[in-house]
Amino acid sequence: QVQLVESGGGLVQAGGSLRLSCAVSGSIFSIIAVDWYRQAPGKQRELVASFTSMSSTFYADSVKGRFTISRDAAKNIMYLQMNSLKPEDTAVYYCNAETERGDFVWGQGTQVTVSS
């Protein structure tokens, strides 16, 4: 079993920064990738960034160059550093872990609101 707990969301002005954290616990050895998704009101959940067990990364075009996904392996925490935030980045951000068995585990989400 894998458990994920997000934190770090909040209200920030456009152009500001936030760092989201995803604390990972449980069967960490079974995880092959950890992703950040977001869902804005009335929109589908979308992939924002991904970090695989081989340390490769992926970013959605909308956040490339502004967001950075990283890992603190010693603390079992995944981060999403978000810079130059825009109002359109407003959403609930979710951490997701994919396991070797093909399971997808979700955190509870953290709200990010960017004011103009």
Image (tube, rainbow, N blue to C red):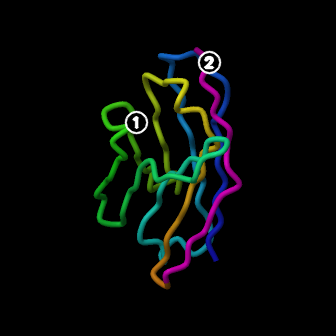
Q: Quadrant of residue 27?
A: bottom right
Q: Is residue 95 above or below residue 91?
A: below
**Residue visible at 41% across and 71% down?**
32
Magenta stretch encompasses residue 67: no
> Magenta residues?
102-116
- x and y, in percent, of residue 104 in the image: 56, 72
Residue 67 is tagged as: 1
Magenta stretch prevailing secondary structure: strand
- What is the spatial separation of the Cα atoms under label 1 and label 2, in whole angstroms? 18 Å
- Badge 2 marks a residue whose secondary structure is strand
Q: Position of residue 17 (x, y in %)?
A: 50, 23
- Secondary structure type for disc 1: strand
The residue nearer to you, when weighing 4 against 88, is 88
Answer above or below: position of 76 versus 98: above
> Can you give x and y, in whole percent of width and height, for residue 89 in the image?
53, 32
Q: Residues within 10 Å of mark 2 (few under 14, many from 20)?
A: some
Residue bearing mark 2: 115
